[in-house]
Amino acid sequence: MLIDTHCHIANIEYDADREEVIQRAIKAGIGKMIVVGTDSLTSQRGVALSEKYPFLFATVGLHPHEAEEMNPQLLLELEKLSLHPKVVAIGETGLDFYYNHAKPEKQREAFWMQITLAQKRRLPLVIHTRDAWEDTFVLLEKADRAYLKEVGSVFHCFTGDKAAALRGTGLGISISFSGIVTFPKTATLQEAAACMDSRFLLIETDAPFLSPQGFRGKRNEPSYIVTTAEKIAALRNCSFEEVAETTSANANRVFRLL
């Protein structure tokens, strides 16, 4: 069994064929999927979708692209949504200084508010970081260290190097690899995947984005995570079954899916 720890199948891109996408995932051996929220609407949609299937779970949060929208009312809304029994994390939140769709100071403020919420709710964080590693670590290292160690969090769609992975796992943060690791020109990322501590290893699709090699140019979907797991197995010189067992056990622990 595989677990897709990060997908967006509640989004409108799947409105025409969502059931078919879910059934293809089941057929491919995907036992559980975490449907990730990036704003108020997608968080609500993810929670609603998770209610329909026992193997779907949800997160609620505000993406750094939307950080300008953060305010006390929205934070309260996310907190109320997080009380739902199928909600397993806060996020996707973090910092993105590559696109800078929101001002950096607004991103930092929104991220910190969600770190505080995650600590309060004792839920893991789903962290997005791009071109903002040092700023991201500065905020995470201000958080309650006991919370990070005991509850755990995730660097989703990890694109850093071995040093960033080591710094993250040192804080108790798991590292989730997407289809990017299958791309030919990602040697630094592949090195991180090959040598990192297996206790913190996760996989995801980030569907509908970032389809793995062999599916590039197509809308991504959870069934394609098999390709990513195969690549991780090759990089780590182990079996596909070992990657599936390890990443599923880690996902079940971090997100308390059992």
Image (tube, rainbow, N blue to C red):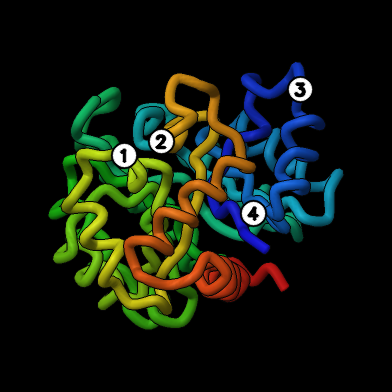
* Residue 197, horizontal then vertical, whole percent: 33, 77
- Mark 1 in CB contact with mark 2 (< 8 angstroms): yes
Task: Name which of mark 2 and mark 4 comes first in the sequence.
Answer: 4
Task: Name which of mark 3 and mark 2 comes first in the sequence.
Answer: 3
For residue 77, say whether it is visible: no
Callout 4 amino acid: Ser
Q: Nearer the viewer, mark 2 or mark 4?
A: 2
Image quadrant assignment for residue 185: top left
The residue sitting at 49% across, 75% down in the picture is: 151
Identify the disc placed on residue 239.
none
Task: Name which of mark 3 and mark 1 comes first in the sequence.
Answer: 3
Task: Name which of mark 4 and mark 3 comes first in the sequence.
Answer: 3
User: How many numbered marks appear?
Assistant: 4
Image quadrant assignment for residue 201: bottom left
Up the image or down, 191 lies above or below 21; here it is: below
Residue most toward the top? 16
Callout 1 amino acid: Phe
Callout 2 amino acid: Gln
- Mark 4 in CB contact with mark 3 (< 8 angstroms): no
Q: Nearer the viewer, mark 4 or mark 3?
A: 3
The residue sitting at 46% across, 50% down in the picture is: 228
Secondary structure under the numbered disc 3 in the rendered image: loop
For the residue pair 85 and 258, the one nearer the viewer reads as 258
- Residue highlighted by disc 2: 213
Point out the image quarter for the N terminus. bottom right
- Residue highlighted by disc 1: 183
Q: Alpha carbon of mark 4 to alpha carbon of mark 3: how far?
A: 27 Å
Identify the disc placed on residue 82.
4
Q: 32 left or right of 163?
A: right
Identify the disc placed on residue 17.
3
